[in-house]
Image (cartoon, helix red, strand yellow):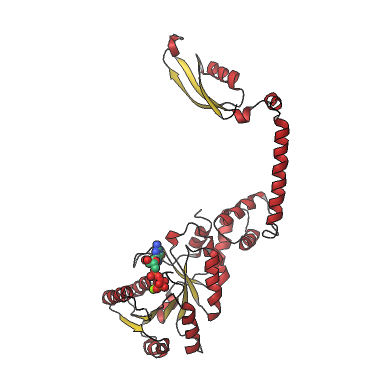
């Protein structure tokens, strides 16, 4: 017989009821509840009685003779052997992935936590090696690695937003335009050949709200003149289309051979999987990106990739966005806050 069996036991005292439980269910019984009842069941007791509800897991409580009579010992041994083989096989499979994981029990918990949050195995190993055996120490190590520069370096000259389609460039640019505007600094917006009615309408609306200039740039070769005319007078924010962001980067490198005068910000969607994000990053890392920004944190389920991407790109973070709403869904996180996110908010 297998599974959980639940039964009520009655005694005149608690002790008596418990004896009845022990007698029938043995020492492994679990007491679920007890209560006083009036007169006992079917008037068996004149006085008040105690009713104890107990349970027993028949699978666990099977006595040795039950096992042997059903021929279970051999079966269990076979099962154990099977499990041992399987663990051996798993260890073998994982060896190339986890080459040097010789860590104690407490640290293993921290390591597993990092892996669950999506921190790359190799990065997690190094983090665990550098950290002490508690979560606060681990957070401190992560926090030290997270470089945040915010948007102050942008206010002086401006920023160009680059990244794959739908990463959140246009939306984020708008939020940052509001941030800079709220500091009473003039903003200028440019957009590189984005002919979508929705984008144009959106920027027109922004120019009215923020009293800023909007300029649609048809050809990237017009950029130097336009930028140098405005530089230092306003914070220039330049939107780019996502569909050919590599061409845009290539174009910038050719048109500004001695370096682009504004910060180049790579916008990364954190709800995207790491492999795709890394592939995109690899394809453009050589174009001198200055800073990264994380978007759509509200859609991500865990935040290990914030750490992965910070370390792998080696670029400081400008901002993170936490929803689609303009202007409020953006913040400049502290390294400590980022570290808390990476370990899962603990
Ligand atoms: N949930 C959520 N949605 C966001 C966030 N940022 C942007 N979005 C949404 O993501 C979608 C794409 O955002 P855009 O700003 O148009 O992205 P883009 O990078 O300019 O896209 P392209 O111009 O097509 O390359 C829009 O529906 C935004 O509202 C965010 O932080 N959270
Ligand atoms: Mg856009």
* Residue 324 location (% of width, % of height): 37, 64
Which residue is at a point 45% across and 82% down the rendered structure image? Answer: 262
16 in relation to 201, above or below: above
Q: In this view of the protein, which residue sits in the foreground, 17 or 163?
A: 163
Which residue is at a point 34% across and 76% down the rendered structure image? Answer: 196
How many numbered marks have been drawn onto this rendered protein structure? 0
- The answer to whether residue 194 of the structure is visible from this angle is yes
State which quadrant residue 233 falls in. Answer: bottom left
- Ligand 2 - quadrant of the structure image: bottom left
* Residue 99 location (% of width, % of height): 70, 60
* Left or right relative to 298: residue 29: right
Locate the N terminus by quadrant.
top right
* Residue 97 location (% of width, % of height): 67, 60
State which quadrant residue 84 falls in. Answer: top right
* Left or right relative to 332: residue 182: left
Q: In this view of the protein, which residue sits in the foreground, 47 or 173?
A: 173
Which residue is at a point 53% across and 77% down the rendered structure image? Answer: 284
* Residue 127 location (% of width, % of height): 62, 61
Q: In this view of the protein, which residue sits in the foreground, 81 or 305?
A: 81
112 in relation to 280, above or below: above
344 in relation to 32, above or below: below
Residue with the most extreme left position: 208
- The answer to whether residue 169 of the structure is visible from this angle is no
164 in relation to 71, above or below: below
């Amino acid at each position: 017989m297998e599974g959980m069996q639940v039964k009520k036991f009655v005694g005149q005292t608690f002790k008596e009821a418990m004896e009845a439980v022990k007698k029938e269910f043995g020492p492994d019984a679990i007491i679920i509840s007890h209560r006083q009842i009036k007169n006992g069941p079917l008037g068996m007791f004149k006085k008040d009685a105690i009713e104890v509800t107990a349970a027993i897991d028949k699978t666990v409580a099977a006595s040795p003779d039950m096992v042997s009579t059903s021929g279970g010992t051999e079966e269990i041994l076979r099962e154990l052997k099977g499990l041992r083989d399987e663990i051996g096989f798993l260890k073998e499979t994982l060896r190339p992935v986890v080459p040097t994981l010789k860590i104690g029990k407490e640290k293993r918990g921290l390591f597993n936590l990092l892996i669950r949050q999506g921190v790359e195995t190799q990065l997690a190993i190094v983090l665990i090696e550098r950290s002490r055996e508690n979560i606060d120490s681990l957070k401190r190590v992560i926090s030290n690695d997270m470089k945040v520069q915010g948007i102050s370096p942008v206010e002086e000259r401006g920023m160009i937003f680059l990244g794959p389609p739908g990463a959140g460039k246009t939306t984020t640019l708008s939020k940052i335009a509001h941030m800079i505007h709220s500091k009473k600094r003039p903003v200028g917006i440019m957009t590189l050949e984005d002919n979508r009615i929705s984008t144009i309408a959106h920027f027109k609306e922004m120019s009215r709200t923020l009293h800023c200039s909007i300029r649609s740039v048809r050809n990237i070769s017009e950029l130097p003149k336009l930028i140098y005319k405005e530089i230092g007078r306003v914070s220039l924010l330049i939107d780019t289309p996502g569909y050919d962001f590599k061409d845009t980067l290539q174009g910038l490198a050719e048109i500004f051979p001695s370096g682009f005068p504004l910060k180049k910000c790579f916008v990364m969607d954190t709800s995207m999987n790491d492999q795709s994000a890394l592939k995109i990053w690899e394809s453009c890392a050589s174009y001198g990106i200055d800073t990264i920004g994380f978007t759509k944190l509200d859609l991500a389920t865990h935040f290990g990739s914030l750490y992965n991407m910070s370390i792998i790109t080696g670029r400081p973070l400008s901002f993170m966005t936490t929803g689609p709403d303009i202007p409020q869904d953006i913040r400049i996180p502290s390294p400590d806050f980022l570290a808390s996110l990476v370990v899962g908010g603990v």
